[in-house]
Image (cartoon, rainbow, N blue to C red):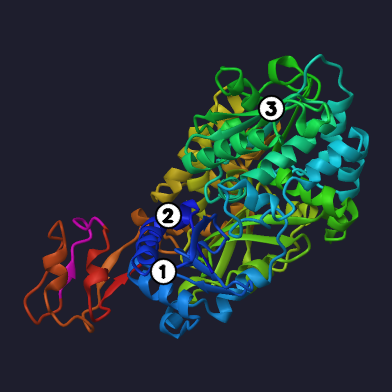
C-alpha cells in the first residue's frame, strides 16, 4: 500500500505540507505498513491538496481538497481497504474527466512519480531514450527522428526543433552549448515550473539527447529564481543522474560527455528572448542582440548554441522511445503532437491541461475546464500572455493550431490561457498586459521603450474616464509602429493584447470614451453608486460601513449617496441585504 501526497507548489500552497506531516504521524501511531511518498502537480490545481492511495494491485483511490484532520481516516482506509469513511473527499466523476480527456506526453510522469527519486523515473522507462540514442543512433539519425515528429518549439515561436538542432550541429566551433529556457515570465503561465517540479529527470534526459545531437559538451538550465522548489528538485536530479552515470563524463560508457548546471535568473521578462537570455548568462544586462548571427552560429560566449524551452525538451525522450511518427500522428498537418496549457482565470477547473493539437478552445475551456465560474457568460480568452491576444466568444470553436490561432490575432505562445467572463473589462485587460510589458521593457530600442509607455498613458486615461476622440486610432497607429520597429520578438508582440481588444471589443473602448461608462462595471473611475429608494429599508448598515461618510439618511427611511464624496469602494453594495445599491 502506498500513500502519495501532491507536493507541487500549488499543493504546498494549499496545505499539502501539513497533510503530509499528519499522515506521517498517523502511520507511525497506527504502526501502518503503508509507504508514504510525494509527487509533483498532476495538473488539477483547483483540487489541491490531493492524496492518492495505491493498493498493492495498482488500484488507485484519489482524494481531493484534503486537510490534516482527514489523515487518520485515510490511513485507516488504506489499512482496511474500506474507503467509505472518506467518501466525502473522494474525487468525483466530473473531476476525473479533467484528466481522462487529456493526452499526456510532456506531463506523463507529473503527479505520478516521486520527482526526488531517480529510481521512480527509471522504473517508468526513464533514461531509455538516452540509452537508445548514445548506444544505437548517430546524431544525424536523432535529428531526423525529431524532424519526422514535427516537434516545434513550445516556447512561443513554434519554430521547427530539428532545424535549430541541425543548424547548431553543422556550425563549426571547438565548443558548443545547449541551453534550456525556463525563464517562464508570462502572467498566468506555470507549465515549465510544474514540469521541473514534477519530472526533472525528463528534462535532463531530453536535454542530453539534444546535446548529443548537436555535439554540445555543456548544458545550462536558465530558470527563474522565483522557482525555488523547481531549482531544488532539479539540482537533486542532476546529482542523482551523475551518480548513476547518466550525466557528466563518459555517459553510459559510450564516450559521450555532457555536464549540466543551473543559472538562476533575476526574473526579467525580456530574458525569455533567447539572445537576451544569453546576455544574462554571460553576466550582462539582459538585452536582445541583433540577429543575424543567430545563436546556432554565435550564441553563448559566441559559440554555437541551441536554445529550447522546458516543454520542448520534455517531449524528446518520448519521441525517441516511441518514434517520431507516433508523435506526428497526433495534431494537425501544420501543428504536430500535444500542447500543454495553463488554464487560469474565471474557470471552474483551473490547472494544467495537455491536449493534442487540433482540439478547439471550446474543448479545453468547457469540456475539460468545466466552463465559467458562477454560471456567468464566457467573454474571451487571452492566449499567449502579454505577447498574445484575446479571442472572443464568437471564435470559441477556433482550432488550437499555430496557424489558426495566429489568424485570430493571438498566438499559441508558451501556453498561458487566461479565461475571462462577462464582468471583465477588455480595456482594463489590455491596460493590465501593457502595464506589464512597459515595465518589463529592457529599454534598448526606442519603439518599445517609449511606445509602450505612450500606449499605457492613453489606456490609463481611457479607464479613468478621461479618454478623448481619436485615442483608439492613435493606439492603433502606435501598435503598428512598435510592431514594425521593435528590436526583438517581445517588443514586436507587445501590442497584440491591445490590437485584438480593439478588433473584437471596439464598442467597449467607445463606451469608455464617448459615454464615460464601463459596460463591465469594472473600471472604478467610471462607476456611479446610487440607492434605489423603493428597495432601501433604512437599516443604516450601508451608512455605518461607508469609510468616508458619503451615505446619509434616517433610520427606516431611504438613504442617499453623495456622488462627490463617494470613493466607489463598493462597501455599501457588499453589505446591503436588500439589493438596494445600484452600480452604473
Q: Which residues fall within the magenta stretch?
A: 559-567
Q: Which label was assigned to residue 259? A: 3
Evaluate if marks 2 and 1 touch, with contact meaning CB atoms under 8 Å apart. Answer: no
Report, in whole angstroms, how far the alpha carbon at label 3 lies from the one at label 2. 31 Å
Q: On the picture, is 569 further left or further right than 116? A: left
Question: Residue 393: x percent and y percent?
Answer: 63, 67
Residue at 87 percent across and 60 percent down: it is 329
**Upstream in sequence: badge 2 or badge 1:** 2
Report, in whole angstroms, how far the alpha carbon at label 3 lies from the one at label 1. 40 Å
Question: Residue 69: x percent and y percent?
Answer: 32, 70
Asked if residue 333 is among those painted magenta in the image, a careful observer would answer no
Q: Secondary structure at mark 2?
A: helix
Report, in whole angstroms, how far the alpha carbon at label 2 lies from the one at label 1. 12 Å
> Mark 3 or mark 2, which is nearer to you?
3
Rate crowding at label 1 as few (under 14), some (14 to 19) or many (20 or more) other CA atoms within 10 Å. Answer: many
Q: Secondary structure at mark 3?
A: strand
**Upstream in sequence: badge 3 or badge 1:** 1
* Quarter location, residue 387: top right
* Quarter location, residue 86: bottom left
Q: Nearer the viewer, residue 278 or 199?
A: 199
Question: Residue tagged by mark 1?
Answer: 66
Q: On the picture, is 142 further left or further right than 57? A: right
In the displayed structure, would residue 298 be above or below residue 100? Answer: above
Q: On the picture, is 81 further left or further right than 448? A: left
Question: Residue 564: x percent and y percent?
Answer: 21, 56
Q: Which label was assigned to residue 12? A: 2
Amino acid at each position: 500500500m502506498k500513500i502519495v501526497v501532491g507536493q507541487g507548489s500549488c499543493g504546498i500552497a494549499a496545505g499539502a505540507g501539513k497533510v503530509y506531516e499528519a499522515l506521517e504521524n498517523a502511520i507511525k501511531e497506527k504502526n501502518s505498513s503503508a509507504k508514504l511518498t510525494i509527487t509533483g502537480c498532476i495538473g488539477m490545481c483547483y483540487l489541491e491538496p490531493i492524496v492518492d492511495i495505491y493498493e498493492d494491485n495498482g488500484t488507485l483511490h484519489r482524494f481531493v481538497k484534503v486537510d490534516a484532520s482527514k489523515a487518520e481516516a485515510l490511513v485507516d482506509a488504506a489499512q482496511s481497504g474500506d474507503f467509505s469513511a472518506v467518501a466525502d473527499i473522494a474525487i468525483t466523476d466530473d473531476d476525473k474527466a479533467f484528466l481522462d480527456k487529456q493526452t499526456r506526453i510532456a506531463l506523463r510522469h507529473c503527479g505520478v512519480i516521486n520527482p526526488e527519486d531517480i529510481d521512480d523515473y527509471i522504473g517508468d522507462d526513464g533514461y531509455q531514450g538516452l540509452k537508445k540514442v548514445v548506444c544505437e543512433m548517430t546524431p544525424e539519425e536523432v535529428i531526423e527522428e525529431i524532424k519526422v515528429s514535427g516537434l516545434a518549439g513550445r516556447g512561443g515561436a513554434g519554430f521547427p526543433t530539428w532545424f535549430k538542432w541541425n543548424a547548431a550541429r553543422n556550425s563549426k566551433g571547438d565548443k558548443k552549448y545547449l541551453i534550456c529556457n525556463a525563464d517562464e515570465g508570462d502572467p498566468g503561465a506555470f507549465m515549465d515550473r510544474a514540469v521541473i517540479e514534477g519530472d526533472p529527470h525528463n528534462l535532463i534526459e531530453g536535454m542530453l539527447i539534444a546535446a548529443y545531437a548537436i555535439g554540445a559538451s555543456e548544458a545550462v538550465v536558465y530558470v527563474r529564481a522565483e522557482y525555488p522548489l523547481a531549482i531544488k528538485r532539479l539540482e537533486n536530479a542532476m546529482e542523482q543522474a551523475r551518480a548513476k552515470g547518466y550525466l557528466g563524463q563518459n555517459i553510459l560508457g559510450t564516450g559521450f560527455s555532457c555536464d549540466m548546471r543551473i543559472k538562476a535568473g533575476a526574473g526579467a521578462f525580456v530574458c525569455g528572448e533567447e539572445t537576451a537570455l544569453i546576455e544574462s548568462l554571460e553576466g550582462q544586462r539582459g538585452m536582445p542582440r541583433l540577429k543575424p548571427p543567430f545563436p546556432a552560429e554565435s550564441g553563448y560566449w559566441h559559440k554555437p548554441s541551441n536554445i529550447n524551452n522546458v516543454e520542448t525538451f520534455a517531449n524528446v525522450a518520448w519521441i525517441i522511445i516511441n518514434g517520431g511518427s507516433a508523435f506526428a500522428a497526433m495534431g494537425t498537418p501544420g501543428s504536430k503532437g500535444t500542447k500543454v496549457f495553463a488554464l487560469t482565470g474565471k474557470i471552474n477547473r483551473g490547472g494544467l491541461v495537455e491536449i493534442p493539437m487540433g482540439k478547439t478552445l471550446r474543448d479545453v475551456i468547457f469540456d475539460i475546464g468545466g466552463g465559467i465560474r458562477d454560471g456567468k457568460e464566457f467573454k474571451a480568452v487571452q492566449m499567449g500572455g502579454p505577447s498574445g491576444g484575446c479571442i472572443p466568444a464568437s471564435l470559441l470553436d477556433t482550432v488550437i493550431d499555430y496557424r489558426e490561432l495566429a489568424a485570430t490575432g493571438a498566438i499559441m505562445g508558451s501556453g498561458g490561457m487566461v479565461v475571462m467572463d462577462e464582468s471583465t473589462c477588455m480595456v482594463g485587460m489590455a491596460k493590465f498586459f501593457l502595464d506589464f510589458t512597459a515595465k518589463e521593457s529592457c529599454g534598448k530600442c526606442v519603439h518599445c521603450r517609449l511606445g509602450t509607455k505612450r500606449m499605457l498613458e492613453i489606456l490609463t486615461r481611457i479607464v479613468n474616464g478621461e479618454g478623448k476622440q481619436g485615442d483608439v486610432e492613435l493606439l492603433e497607429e502606435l501598435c503598428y509602429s512598435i510592431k514594425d520597429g521593435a528590436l526583438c520578438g517581445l517588443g514586436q508582440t507587445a501590442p497584440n493584447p491591445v490590437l485584438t481588444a480593439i478588433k473584437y471589443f471596439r464598442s467597449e473602448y467607445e463606451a469608455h470614451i464617448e459615454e464615460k461608462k464601463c459596460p463591465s462595471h469594472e473600471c472604478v473611475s467610471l462607476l456611479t453608486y446610487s440607492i434605489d429608494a423603493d428597495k432601501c429599508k433604512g437599516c443604516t448598515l450601508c451608512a455605518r460601513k461607508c469609510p468616508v461618510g458619503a451615505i446619509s439618511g434616517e433610520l427606516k427611511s431611504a438613504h442617499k449617496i453623495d456622488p462627490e464624496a463617494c470613493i466607489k469602494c463598493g462597501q455599501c453594495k457588499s453589505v446591503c441585504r436588500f439589493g438596494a445599491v445600484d452600480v452604473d
